[in-house]
Image (tube, rainbow, N blue to C red):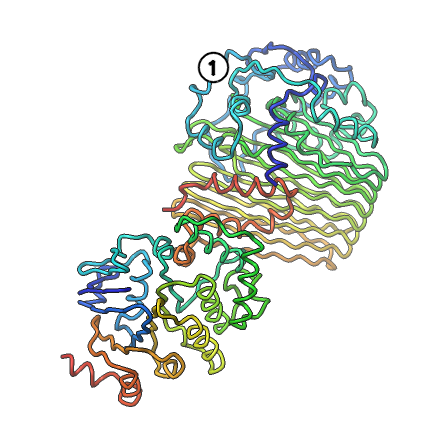
Amino acid sequence: MLKIENLHAEVDGKPILRGLNLTVLPGEVHAIMGPNGSGKSTLAYLIAGRPGYTVTQGSITYNGHDLLALAPEERAGEGVFLAFQYPVEIPGVNNVYMLKAAVNGIRKYRGLDEMGAVEFLKLVKAKTKAIGLPDGLLNRPVNQGFSGGEKKRNEIFQMSVLEPHLAILDETDSGLDIDALKVVADGVNRLRSPQRSFVVVTHYQRLLDYIVPDQVHVLARGQIVKSGTRELALELEARGYDWLSEDAA
Amino acid sequence: MATSSSDVRELLNRKYDAGFYTDIEQDQVPPGLNEAVVRLISAKKNEPNWMLEWRLRAFSRWQKMREPKWAHVHYPPIDFQALSYYSAPKSKKDGPQSLDDVDPKLLETYKKLGIPLEEQKMLAGVAVDVVFDSVSVHTTFKDKLAAAGVIFCSFSEAVREHPELVRKYLGSVVPQGDNYYAALNSAVFSDGSFVYIPKNTRCPMELSTYFRINAMNTGQFERTLVIADIGSYVSYLEGCTAPQRDENQLHAAVVELIALDDAEIKYSTVQNWYPGDEEGRGGIYNFVTKRGDCRGRNSKISWTQVETGSAITWKYPSCILKGENSVGEFYSVAVTHHRQQADTGTKMIHLGRNTRSTIISKGISAGHGQNAYRGLVRIAKSAENARNYTQCDSLLMGSQCGAHTFPYVEVRNASAKVEHEASTSKISEDQLFYLRSRGIRDEDAVNLIVNGFCKAVFKELPMEFAVEAQKLLNITLEGAIG
């Protein structure tokens, strides 16, 4: 599904990733943990194609294609989805309307006919119910005036409608109370399938109680310094990250 | 929606019957402006003496006036003696001889708007000899209007057929000496439209598609007068979403609206005159005076404008809220791209008790475009309990453009409530990336954001036009980002 090899990347001339390797197979859930500034969000943005991030070395291969050669919208068309850490507000743009543009943008990319309004609304209704998204959020401008929890929930809702093949969750759990966290985890678990993979970037072990990962990686100073199973996450919670940095050095 | 706009196109492909304008063949008055020219124009139109006198009074006023310089726009001085004041309809020899002679960019835009070839030629000013069906749809319109007692005709016709109405109302909202361009227009106006809605009559249709056919030849000094008698309603739409070429660089129109007791006028404009090329060469100077007079109790005048064309726009559709409980509204989207400049806004003059006004202005600047909102809210001593709400938002695309806001508020009555909200934002990389990461192409993402920004104004437009205006905006801003 996703193969990242020796990835070096910089932002504004400042190196952030320094030789990162990661392989995610179909159906797997990988958790990326690590201290602030270790490059977790950079990794998420690089996979989604945010402008301003320069890859100086290495590659990201997705289903055998060079992912870095694609524009962000093409990556979405190929089934990549990023749940943002800080979803941006877009005044005046209706949430559902935006989502319909997204669904049809992706369908167009895949050479499919556009989805009609009736069919789309049916889909939205079903997903809204499944995610427990308050109806009121659907017809509000994208993320505008949403609480932190509502924004995150909206990301998961979008994910459930777009049904990506590879979903990156960038600290979707941060700032959530336990109930909201469960909703988010539930949304992810519902989508888990042998064909769909997840990369879950998180600060806290807590989320992994609900989304059980196949592998846990620790990112520090631009590299994956340790990989393991869920047990690693628990150990990190108990011991912090410092001991790993020393190990790596 | 598709059907209605193709109906419109079909309509546009037909010629209008004689009668909407006086056929004056192709004579052209040599450049220059003096009393003799004013007399000549009046004579060509077979005007009665009172009309000529009116023009002459305006001319003598204009001679004593100076061009206004306060607007936030820059252009080389206009030599008013170098212009020809009587040239419509245009001579076929002057225009491009075929579509091959027309700016390819313009043609591209026509294509994107889905305009049929014949219509493209008309809009681009190509000499065409088209044979039209004389029994056109709009004849049916005319019958329907006549049955309701609505008068809708060219200004020249109104001068001949309804002199009592014209004499009573002409210049009663925009006096001859109101401003330099209004005075000029009063002296030399070429033609325009006249609307009268009788008492307690709801105009049976939007005066829109009909007008668009006739808008083709109104010339550079257009004069419009709309009178809504007691208890009547009319929705009037001027303009055309397709960019129109015109050899006349200076456009100085005057529009006067009068709403009597319990009457309502909704006036919508889509202005897309040739904006000049990317370097700012060519393009129309659009210096327009538009004003509505809520003369009667409970009357209402609502202006909605989408301004995407012209090199320079200088325009402040305003409302005088004289009648008790009268309501004035102004909804505006103004776009400047490349080297376009716009100084536009409104004046809400509250004179009557319990008068209310709403101003929603959305300015979009891209490229090197300069966009200024200029608005005046004046609450007179007599305007007990007046209210105004103003919202003025600017959207910047790119880093070379400018947005400017000049709000003036004058309150002379302590019971007034005046609210003003303003914002300036930039389409951010974050917003674009967010949408693109959802699978929305970059151009579509820009359109989505821009249309979201303008939504509050678009929803005031008649339905079919709202869709076209949205499309127009997207085309206007193509290439503005990235």
**Residue B224 x/y as whole percent:** 69, 29
Report which residue position mark 1 lands on.
Answer: B97
In this orientation, which residue lies closer to the viewer: B334 or B112?
A: B112
Can residue B33 be seen here? The reply is no
**Residue B289 x/y as whole percent:** 64, 34
Q: Residue at x 67, y 24 (%)?
A: B61
In this orientation, which residue lies closer to the viewer: B222 or A234?
A: A234
Q: Is residue B197 left or right of residue A5?
A: right
Can residue B208 be seen here? The reply is yes
Please say if B472 is above or below A64.
above
Label 1 sits on what residue type?
Answer: Gln
Q: Count all numbered tags in the image, as a single digit.
A: 1
Please say if B355 is above or below A196.
above
Q: Which residue sits furthest left?
A: A249
**Corner quadrant of residue B24:** top right
Mark 1 neighbour density, 10 Å: few (under 14) some (14–19) many (20 or more):
some
**Corner quadrant of residue B62:** top right
Image quarter in which the N terminus of chain B is found: top right
* Chain letter of the residue carrying label 1: B
Please say if B342 is above or below B410.
above
Please say if B310 is above or below A197.
above
Q: Which element carries disc 1, helix, strand or loop?
A: loop
Q: Is residue B432 left or right of residue B463?
A: left
